[in-house]
Image (cartoon, helix red, strand yellow):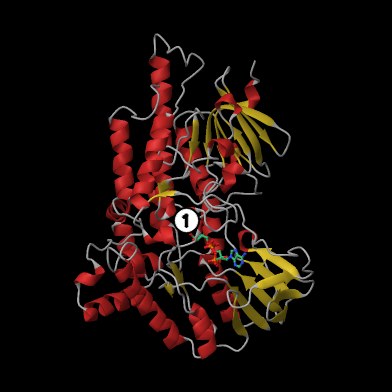
Amino acid sequence: MIAKDTHYDAIVVGAGFGGIYMLKKLIDQGLRVKVLDAAGDVGGTWYCWDKEDLLEYHWDEHYIKQPQALAYLEHIVERHNLRQYMQFDTELTSAQYNEDTNAWEVSTSTNETFTCHYLVTALGLLSKRNFPAIHGLDKFKGEKYHTGGWPKTYDFKGKRVGIIGNGSTGVQVITQLGKEKQVAKLISFQRSPQYSVPSGDGPVSPTYRSQINENYESIWSQVRNSAVGFGFEESTVPCMSVTPAERQAKFQEAWDKGNGFRFMFWTFNDLTMDPAANDEACNFIKSKIKETVKDQEKARKLLPNEYYARRPLCDAGYYQVFNQDFVDVVALKEEPIVRMTENGIETTKGHYDLDVLIFATGFDAVDGNYTRVAVKGRNSESLSEHWATVGPESYMGVSVANFPNLFMITGPNGPFSNIPPAIEIHVEFIADTIALAEKNHQHQTQPQPNNEKGSIVEATLEAERGWTDLCNEYSKDSLFRKSPSWIFGANVPGKKYSSLFFFGGLKDYREKLQKMVDGGYVGYKPF
Ligand code: NA7
């Protein structure tokens, strides 16, 4: 017998962007819902489904910084009175599907157990921190921070700061600390130099804001019907089809407007597919690095030597900060780290004394959050076991075969795009699917033999494998496959190199999802 006060129609794990929207959708559908989150309060990135609020909510700059993003989330939670459904400081430790009761049994770090009919994970793609495998990592006696757990306040005044990692996060941290001019020394311990373009950040003018407010519908429609979902039209022009002068002009225009995704996808349509086109983009950015960084030795170290085919970076003056004497770069491929010491980092060429060490070393992305907790489906098979041979896979980034009534918001092989629009598409699909499952179940005069204990929404293994094959097919010619980044799981030692995203773009993804629904949930067992 299931105790009433610990049983929910749905439990949503994670109170970030996806979890909050999922909660709102499901309570509006009349379900009894609980949200669990390991953190002490709501978190995530930002919001767009509340159009009325969007028209009035104030923001200063084009890129929302962490405090504003958090304030906005808190505001939305208050505005919709959602906090009452949330339980914080409560980490999901295990979830087991019970075939007899058709319920998920959820255990938490607070030693509580709950049951639910539907389990929705809104764990985020990028939250399980990745630490480098460096000898003596724990030896360092100074201050240590991972950017995924950045302190609310910090005081690095007069300190020698080392930072490992120069992806999206490292580039931002280096730029910010370089501009603040508080530290005595800032050293980037850089393994792979990256291509970064200006972000184009700046104040939001009243004219810009009113244009946005007047065009919300068309802006969102364009976003949802684009490939990467960043609010610009992706180019349809091959890079080598124009003259060198036209090419240069287009790159320059993108450079002046700012934003990494714009540079990669708005300029030409084949930078991530055609090596010759890619080379043109590389050369353009490299020329900017050489032009910006005055010290020849620093410039040499900062020049990338791989394809421009990772998550495109942008910055607010990254290369410029290296023109200050207190900012330096150590090329780890020329002098690898030997070990961490009590006072800093020892490389093959010497010792660097540090007071603060920052790890901007990224995340065990996409599936990392799922494999660290025991989520077990039919026959007690865990997700880690399910994914052991083929790699992390799912049906359309949402469902996993043998894991009935489990829904993942942005699970493995979801669309590679701006994340908030992808989250919205998933949340809306999950909410509609649950509504349909509930309706079908209530209206069945003759319940199906397999679901007299409530609806069962479950993808088939065949559909899941088919989707994985499609994802591999879509990415097979992408230069992203040739770059060792988190997008294919290449950043975590020992992690299987596999497709983690659907590369067909948001529009194509949405069309496939709709076609699947219109065809009567093709790839799902009847529900
Ligand atoms: P990323 O993009 O995964 O970057 C991690 C960085 O850390 C990258 O520069 C790595 O170098 C470096 N790294 C990782 N391990 C090591 C070791 N062992 N030694 C030296 N350097 C290392 O993480 P971010 O947090 O910047 O960004 C993740 C996503 O979050 C981002 O794409 C956005 O979408 C938001 P490498 O390049 O592997 O040589």
Measured from the top left, where is residue 88 in percent x and y? 65, 43
| Front one among 357 and 440 | 357
Q: Is residue 103 left or right of residue 249?
A: right
| Front one among 306 and 263 | 306
Measured from the top left, where is residue 304 in percent x and y? 46, 75
Other-residue count near label 1 (Cα within 10 Å), few / some / many at <14 / 14–19 / ≥20: many
As helix, strand or loop, the secondary structure at mark 1 comes to helix
Q: Is residue 271 left or right of residue 61?
A: left
**Residue at x 44% of width, y 63% of height:** 310
**Residue at x 30% of width, y 54% of height:** 226
Q: Quadrant of ligand 1?
A: bottom right
Measured from the top left, where is residue 71 in percent x and y? 55, 57
Measured from the top left, where is residue 147 in percent x and y? 61, 63
| Front one among 433 and 8 | 433
- Above or below, 36 relative to 114: below
**Residue at x 67% of width, y 33% of height:** 107
**Residue at x 43% of width, y 12% of height:** 447
The residue under label 1 is 487
Amino acid under disc 1: Ile
